[in-house]
Amino acid sequence: MPVSISVIIPVYQAQAYLPFCLNSILAQTFSDFEVLCVNDGSRDDSAAILADYAARDARIRVITQENKGVSAARNAALRQARGDYITFLDSDDMWHPRYLERMITPLRETQADFVSCSYHTVPAKQEKPNTEPVSTAKAQMIDTPFDALVWRRYNLTVMVWGKMFRREILTDLYFDERISYGEDYIFVHQAAYIARSAAVVPDDLVCYRTSDNSLMRSSFSDAKVQAHFLLASVLYHFFKECPMQQKTRKRLFRQIAKLLLKYTMSYPLCQSTDNYRQYWHAYAEQLKEYHRRGIYCPRYLSFKNRLVSWLFLHRNFTLLRLIGGV
């Protein structure tokens, strides 16, 4: 049976926060939706929690698969989604009660292909979303969503949550299952490029739960760095031949360069990794290869970061530390 909105939630080891997430969905003022929860091989009580909620509310559908990662989980739900509109929520976050109502309205009233809202952070222990009144202001229309995203205008973010998409623009678009970190980044850029127009709702409708598990605060992992090398490569090769304004292309390549510089230099060091110089030598070699292939373009960086990049590529790590480049 068709529904207006498909809500997609990847679930992995989420027992601590999953009930709060699902409660915030069931408390929505807009009720014509389905919830596709993909249990991605959880070993905790997530499966039991999902089964309990699905038994109580037929709008909740559970998809079970072996652990394949968040991208594969979202893709599994996308293939089964029946809604005219698609929105995503992480299993530890929550929605304001009027999220669905507020987001679907501009999609129905305009030709926008997706709508975006703001978010606010809540403490790890918070069990219910904030319920302050939302504004009555109409959504702001954007006729060049890709440019707006690349230039970070209108408060557009690269996160897939906090957005609702018209189903048609996602027909042939899926998350890259090779990428385990930053998968949102590519998906949202691709969707924004396809979209003819977008809208921004001026309300904080997503409750983003803070924790100590963010990438820059978590333990160092070479796999995370390699995932961002792959992310940069995929993004570059997807967009290098796509028509766009030259200044937007330069801005996009600048972001790729900043991303690579961040994860090859700052990430190993900020984790207080004892042998960070060993990783720096290896990453400098990889980054040099990316430079040779045109994926890493330090010429688009600021003057200071161009200097930092040059020192890093030439492995002058002592001087790099002296000038405070990282």
Image (cartoon, rainbow, N blue to C red):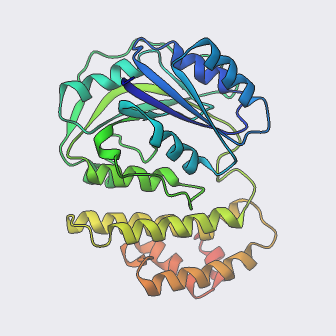
In this rendered view, identify the residue nearer to me: 315 or 12. 12
Tell me if 318 is positioned left or right of 159 in this view: right
Residue 119, above or below 142: above
For this orientation, the residue located farthest to the right is 274
* Quadrant in which residue 15 is drawn: top right
In this rendered view, identify the residue nearer to me: 2 or 130. 2
* Quadrant in which residue 2 is drawn: top left
In this rendered view, identify the residue nearer to me: 41 or 268. 41
User: Can residue 301 be spotted in the picture?
Assistant: no
Residue 165, above or below 310: above
Could you say where residue 83 lies in the image, as x and y percent from the top left? 38, 30
For this orientation, the residue located farthest to the front is 1
Could you say where residue 190 lies in the image, as x and y percent from the top left? 35, 55
In this rendered view, identify the residue nearer to me: 36 or 163. 36
Could you say where residue 295 lies in the image, as x and y percent from the top left? 43, 77
Tell me if 48 is positioned left or right of 286 in this view: right
User: Can residue 205 be spotted in the picture?
Assistant: yes
User: Residue drawn 70% across and 33% down?
Assistant: 14
User: Residue drawn 53% across and 15% down?
Assistant: 26
Q: Quadrant of the C terminus?
A: bottom right
Tell me if 127 is positioned left or right of 177 in this view: right
Residue 290, above or below 126: below
Residue 316, above or below 242: below
Could you say where residue 213 lies in the image, as x and y percent from the top left? 69, 44
User: Residue drawn 44% across and 84% down?
Assistant: 293
Query: How many callouts does the rendering have?
Result: 0
Q: Quadrant of the N terminus?
A: top left
